Amino acid sequence: MSPVYKRIILKLSGEVLRSDDNCISPAIVQEMSEAIKSVVDMGVEVALVIGGGNIFRGLSASRKGMDRTTGDYMGMMATCINALALQDGLESLGIPTRVQSAIAMQQICEPYIRRKAVRHLEKGRVVIFAAGTGSPYFSTDTTAALRANEINAELVLKGTKVDGIYDKDPVKYDDAVKYKEISYTDCLSKQLQVMDSTAFTLCMDNKLPIVVFDFHQEGVLKNILCGNTEAATVVK
């Protein structure tokens, strides 16, 4: 199989890293790293954005009384922990990886510099964008859409625990209907809670397709990048 995309952004929820007894599961990190390696080996340039919800959610904390800005910055720190975990998993498989943070942490990662990120990708390195946009009130979904446009990615892939977008929560409702394809405007009007409205709008304005899929399905990432989106939902 040959990939039909050259450069992608992969957005992963922090929750997919969680095991039942730990906020970061080494086994899941390994699983993710092997899946990412499989597409890097195909010649695809891969950039990652990882959430921090397995460690801390700023929005949830603000609903319980914490200052929203403080909570969001704490959430950004959580994404950096996850980014380092993924970097370790990828490099253990021989994949050169760079973490670029929107908040300066020179002891552990590079600052985000667009041209440098693109150069890393051209050299076959995986780039992990950490600390969101560096500003509160913006989600990591928005970060993925923003960085994808900045580095001229051809596709945003959102890996979750569900195999696409449904009209309602398939975990709670047995009669939930999966969309094979849906427009940005329908996602917004139906208020489907897959990515936030800012992320959808950024992708819509720049005609950047989004694919939502279950990251834990074996081989699904390779199939999508080779043009087979049967096990996913495409937003365009």
Image (cartoon, rainbow, N blue to C red):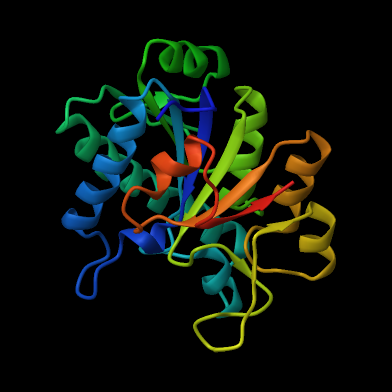
- Position of residue 219 relative to residue 110, above or below, is below
**Drawn side of residue 39 relative to residue 69, left or right:** left
**Drawn side of residue 214 relative to residue 200, left or right:** left
- State the residue at coordinates (35%, 20%): 125
The quarter of the picture where residue 135 lies is top right
From this viewpoint, which residue is outermost toward the left?
92
- Position of residue 181 relative to residue 36, above or below, is below
Rendered location of residue 178, percent (x, y): 62, 70
From this viewpoint, which residue is outermost toward the front?
1
Rendered location of residue 118, percent (x, y): 51, 15
Q: Nearer the viewer, residue 185 or 18?
A: 185
Q: Nearer the viewer, residue 59 or 166?
A: 166
- State the residue at coordinates (40%, 39%): 222
- State the residue at coordinates (75%, 57%): 197
Q: Is residue 95 shown to the viewer in this render? A: yes
Rendered location of residue 200, percent (x, y): 73, 50
Q: Is residue 134 shown to the viewer in this render? A: no
- Position of residue 46 relative to residue 160, above or below, is above
**Drawn side of residue 146 relative to residue 87, left or right:** right
Q: Nearer the viewer, residue 142 or 75?
A: 142
Q: Which quarter of the rendering shows the N terminus?
A: top left
The quarter of the picture where residue 203 lies is top right
Q: Nearer the viewer, residue 44 or 180?
A: 180
Instruction: Report the number of numbered marks.
Output: 0
